[in-house]
Image (spheres, rainbow, N blue to C red):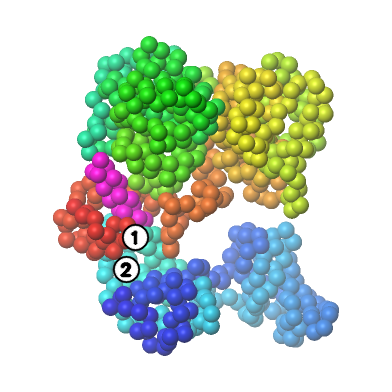
Amino acid sequence: MLDQSVLQLSGVGERMRETLEEMGIYTIEDFLFYFPFRYDYHEVKPLTELVHNEKATIEGEVIGEPSLTFYGKKKSRLMLNLQVEHFAVKAVMFNRAFAKKQLQAGDTVTVTGKWDQHRLQITVSQFKKGKAKNQTPIQPVYSLKGNLKLPTLRKWMGKAIDEYGSYLPEILPSSYLDTYKLPHRVEALYAMHFPESRTRLKHAKRRFVYEEFLLFQLKMQILRKMKREATTGNSQNYDEEAVNHFTDQLPFELTSAQSKALQEILKDMQSHYRMNRLLQGDVGSGKTAVAAIALYATITSGKQGSLMVPTEILAEQHHQSLSELFEGKANVVLLTGSVKGKKRKEILTQIEENEADIIIGTHALIQDEVRFHDLALSIIDEQHRFGVNQRRALRDKGLNPDVLFMTATPIPRTLAITAFGDMDVSIIDQMPAGRKEVETYWIKEQMLDRVLTFIKKEVDNGHQAYVISPLIEESDTLDIQNAVDIYNQLTQYYDGDLKVGLMHGRLSAEEKEEIMKQFADNEVQVLVSTTVVEVGVNVPNATVMLIYDAERFGLSQLHQLRGRVGRGSEQSYCILLADPKGDVGKERMRIMSETSNGFELSEQDLQLRGPGDFFGRKQSGVPEFKVADMVHDYRALETARQDAKEIIDHNLLSTNEEYNELLKRLEKDPILQGQILD
């Protein structure tokens, strides 16, 4: 019944069907679940609770005579002074000249409109004489198209619920409804469209938030189980004693967070299933050390490991540090686009004939000519820099290695388990002992001279500095000093006392590599760059990061940039040059100056920006929900994930009748269709 066309609804003809289809409504079920995007309830609140520039309703007494002025043709402005609580509030009405006769001093009036906190003024959109009713009806607001009007949609909705509501199955087991005190599905659906009270609406929303999250998390857990079970037989029998000895020989002790992440990875490597794990750790938290131990474990099992990174210079750095670490224990080779001719052939032969134990490189590693002998562990650094297709290329080579993705973008745990729901997530949320925190300062334009003098002082002490600019060239629309300008200014300012370099996105890969190499070798002391430097080279000698127009960046990006300094033993500094006009920009600068923990920052960034911006453009993996909001409802998301895990781990979908409706709902999902869920 529910999958019938909307034409079955009385009053819907062929033309209206087309309009509804434009709104994404094809079936009766689609129509029933077409929820309002907001609800208007004009409730009188104390002035202290009103939000600047938002709609508000206030009640007050008219003081003195209202003043009416006419301007232009048939245009008027009526000004009232209202006594609200202990305040005098101005109420402005446009083109309501008739109201002057209706309102006299001493009258009580209820007005609704846009509230201006700074002027204590309300621009009135509707008014009525007398006090506000305590219970103003809640008005659902729908997104409409074509000729469809709100009263028509509401009338059809009422009929549809009456006629078809009884066919709507309850998909949540009764134990969940009882535990979480959730209303039944039909009852909740009615409350979403015809809310009798705010409490009922709140519980209805709570129910659908949980339902959406549970279905999504179940789908993720099923996909994860299918992925794991599709690749059996790649367990690595590594030498535990050798791995422990290797770990003990490291020049530093692992933090407890590193040890925990390492144990999770090693356990996955020993299992029969293919590892699919995300290792998250703040810049400098020691992910590479954990990766190195995992690679060593692979070598002791007689197999090969690879490390894929986004840039050649980063690959070279890893090759150098891992060659030193594994000296005498493993053959570490480097394969990038720059390795050519005889040398390249030699390395390709070593890889194919199992003479190369660890292969480090850029995406050159996934080209057709590279044939691994027995690749058992593939580590991919800064995984969001590699497309899904590049990751799939490894599998297309007939390889099913354990895969470890690493990222220094501290995605909040809530989002990580959702966006990467088919992955296991390990988190390193501790910094190694003795690492100095980068001191962060927010300055205005007039202090720039002092900062440039300070950079000169740091360079005189043998250090280096990054200077970051948001754009390459002058933009007509944005007043931003660009990288080229800054480069010219600094070259002139330092007048040959130190060498200034320039890097931006328009340079070729070779040019970028060259300038980064000069900076790494301290041939360039101050590097002016756009954000291409965000993920990249490790220059322990760099102690200053100056960011122009810092208000143009999100918190996570600023934190990533700040992570380029503070990599050595010296005290480092991050200076934010910004003059934000809005509250959000000012809040960002304040948070950056006070917080150095990337995970705390990312949670705050999420509150300021929402999840869409977090993953850039709409990315597969960040789902769109009708009612649920991943930021606002993160507790429900976590609960749903735990419940979904339990359902799949205990095989409840196929063994317990209470879960039949959930199973039917999941089987309708195109991605899961035809898959056996038991």
Q: Quadrant of residue 522?
A: top right
Q: Amino acid at mark 1?
A: Glu
Part of the protein shown in magenta: 213-231
1 or 2: tag closer to the N-terminus:
2
Magenta span has 229? yes
Density class for disc 1 (Cα within 10 Å; few <14, some 14-19, many ≥20) is many
Q: Is residue 408 above or below residue 476?
A: above
- Packing grade of label 2 (10 A; few <14, some 14-19, many >=20) is many
Would residue 424 be counted in the magenta stretch? no
**What is the x, y in percent for residue 288?**
44, 26
Quadrant (top left, top right, bottom left, bottom right) of the N terminus? bottom left
Q: Residue at x 53, y 83 (%)?
A: 147
Q: Residue at x 15, y 55 (%)?
A: 655
Q: The residue tagged with tag 1: helix, strand or loop?
A: helix
Q: Nearer the viewer, residue 455 or 673?
A: 673
Where in the figure is residue 500, as x and y percent of width and height?
A: 73, 26
Q: Position of residue 98 (x, y in %)?
A: 74, 86
* On screen, residue 662 above or below 239: below
- The image quadrant of residue 439 is top right
Q: Are marks 1 and 2 in contact (CB under 8 Å)?
A: yes
Where residue 27 appears, as percent x and y from the top left, is 36, 75
The alpha-carbon separation of the residues under discs 1 and 2 comes to: 10 Å
Can residue 203 be seen in the rendering of this structure? Answer: no
Give the prevailing secondary structure in the magenta stretch. Answer: helix
Asked whether residue 109 is in view, the answer is yes
Circle 1 residue: 211
Amino acid tagged 2:
Arg
| 432 displayed left or right of 181 | right
Q: Nearer the viewer, residue 306 or 534?
A: 306
Residue marked by disc 2 = 185
In the depicted structure, whether residue 225 falls above or below residue 126: above
Residue placed at 62% from the left, 67% from the top?
55
